[in-house]
Image: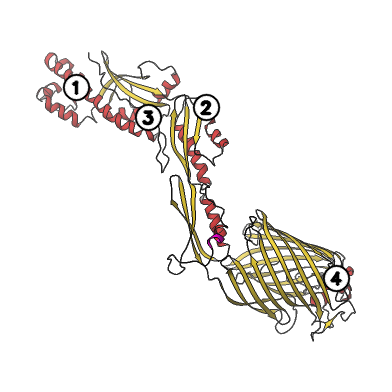
Amino acid sequence: MLQNDDIRIVSSSIKIPLPHKRPTCPLRTAHSHFVNASNSIAQLFNSFAAHSTELTRSVVRNSSLLCSATLSFTGERRGKCPIQRLASLSLADIEAQQKARQNEERVLISEVLVRNKDGEELERKDLEAEAVQALKACRPNSALTVREVQEDVHRIINSGYFSSCMPVAVDTRDGIRLVFQVEPNQEFQGLVCEGANVLPAKFLENSMRDGYGKIINLRRLDEAISSINNWYMERGLFAMVSAVEILSGGILRLQVSEAEVNNISIRFLDRKTGEITMGKTKPETILRQITTKKGQVYSMLQGKRDVETVLTMGIMEDVSIIPQPADTGKVDLVMNVVERPSGGFSAGGGISSGITNGPLRGLIGSFAYSHRNVFGKNQKLNISLERGQIDSVYRINYTDPWIQGDDKRTSRTITIQNSRTPGTIVHGNEDGNRSLTIGRITGGIEFSRPLRPKWSGTAGLVFQHAGVRDEKGIPIIKDCYSSPLTASGNTHDDTLLAKLETVYTGSGDHGSSMFVLTMEQGLPVLPEWLSFSRVNARARKGVEIGPARLHLSLSGGHVVGEFSPYEAFAIGGTNSVRGYEEGSVGSGRSYVVTSGEVSFPMKGPVEGVLFSDYGTDLGSGPTVPGDPAGARKKPGSGYGYGFGIRVESPLGPLRLEYAFNDKKERRFHFGVGHRN
């Protein structure tokens, strides 16, 4: 009996090149092997069919008893006996029908074996068991089609343990024997990874550790490659495993493609038409804001943060980053920006906490000119005027948010200010002196920089020339209680303050955590200049309680040395202890104010709030020059509680609150913006 030695499927040793654009599962890379296998399997079954024809001819010539043995090779049983049907057909007709039905023709298989590529038994029985377990259709004494054999070849390869699988048909006395000749993968002995510049070596080792010393399984290899690609995706990095190859000696070679940034350019777009236009901002002013640099692997998450950073400059209306392909393995970034109008005039209004009576109690108006992008360097100039019943503030402010040449993102602010504020917070009383005003002329410079995430620091030097005037604008040095109004005994006090401040901002929302610590030192450069040390701290914490939110705040401060009475810490009022007038609890060298609020949504932008405040001067009132609090019989400590509503507005939250204090007094409080 003839053997089908010429009928076999041979695949090349597995080498898994992955497409440049997208990494492909190692299992899918054997697809071409399966396509080639299909043709060989078809030839195998053609040989079966030819053998069937010969067998059928023999049956026709010699014995009708073997009619049933030819059924699996000749097709359907309809009407006539298969012998008579075959006898009535020409050989050409039979071959044509078999060729048309070769994919559906069934051949009886008597035995199914798994062997190595030389036809011998596999040394490792566990691998043979894996191959046998993968077979679904190919079983002994079963009739198989081309498709079923092809699918089982797929299944053996898809088990991941074998680099090739060749079905070989052997015609024996007992029938057709189907042998799957397989070539197992090599044992994993080492890893070579090329192009992975940002991928941690430890992560790569952990991904491959379980397979060391074992037969390489392509399915597990695919999982390891997916974990590497997911590592890049989670960090928004433009990178992937682009090629995999199994080298001799069990060495696995991974090729990783990481898209490095080749160039970054700025493109200005017209805010109305969207067309490319000339921008006012210098490109280097924008580029220094972003953390993505040339040579880095491009990260979408980092790009998103860069967009947000550029928007916080305050001079852009819209920002987007578009990656474009560049040289092999690199990417060009184009940042499209739409500039906002850089300057203009504005007007507004607000409430002063220092005015407690009068026809326009506490109402102030403001007028300002601002330029957000001086010289195209994002430098900001602000000239403003605020005027109220008594209050007035004239201010010129110039800020460079990032000093050129500094790599720590240090900003510089220069301020000149002339202000007049009511003195009633510390020196007011029921009998008079309600028109006392405190005039201050200040000028200073401050430098700020981020210290670490969510932390920033400020250092500055401020000079202040301040004094007290009566309702006629005449400088005075004593009040109606003959208490001094200045520390030097002159009509004005001069102070040169060195300032240090650190700020923690949490997420930046009002309800998030916040901490501010400010330290000031008076420098007596001249003998008449004041010398004192002042420290002030504020902390805030927000906690979600279902739909409501609990806000807790604590502030306190202390002064050591010679200071002006009007610089004492005033306690009481809208931003201190509600239920009291401004400064009515006390004024001292030291103070502590605590507050607790529960806010809850009501309807739309309206919130309800319940609150309780407590403040004390810690018994330091008499230590203030002239003891203004003691002369006015201020209690030195007190608490308040109440309820209110808040409405979000373009000016900030509008606060209307009704409070009770520990003296059974009641008072409305109105404010704009969040409490300090």
Q: Is residue 402 magenta?
A: no
User: Looking at the picture, how far across and down is residue 135, in whole percent?
Assistant: 37, 26
| Residue 635, numbered circle | 4
Between marks 1 and 3, how big is the CA–CA gap? 28 Å
Of callouts 2 and 4, which one flags the residue occurring earlier in the amino acid sequence?
2
Q: Which residue is mark 2?
A: 212
Height in image: 527 above or below 291?
Answer: below
* Location of residue 588 by image quarter: bottom right
Q: Residues in magenta?
A: 279-285
First in sequence: mark 1 vs mark 3: 1
Is residue 673 found left or right of 23 in the rendered image?
Answer: right
Dot 1 or dot 4: first in sequence order is 1
Q: Classify residue 68 as left or right of residue 8.
A: left
Residue at label 3?
Answer: 155
Closer mark to the observer between disc 1 and disc 2: 2
C-alpha span from label 2 to label 4: 79 Å
Marks 1 and 4 sit apart, C-alpha to C-alpha, by: 116 Å
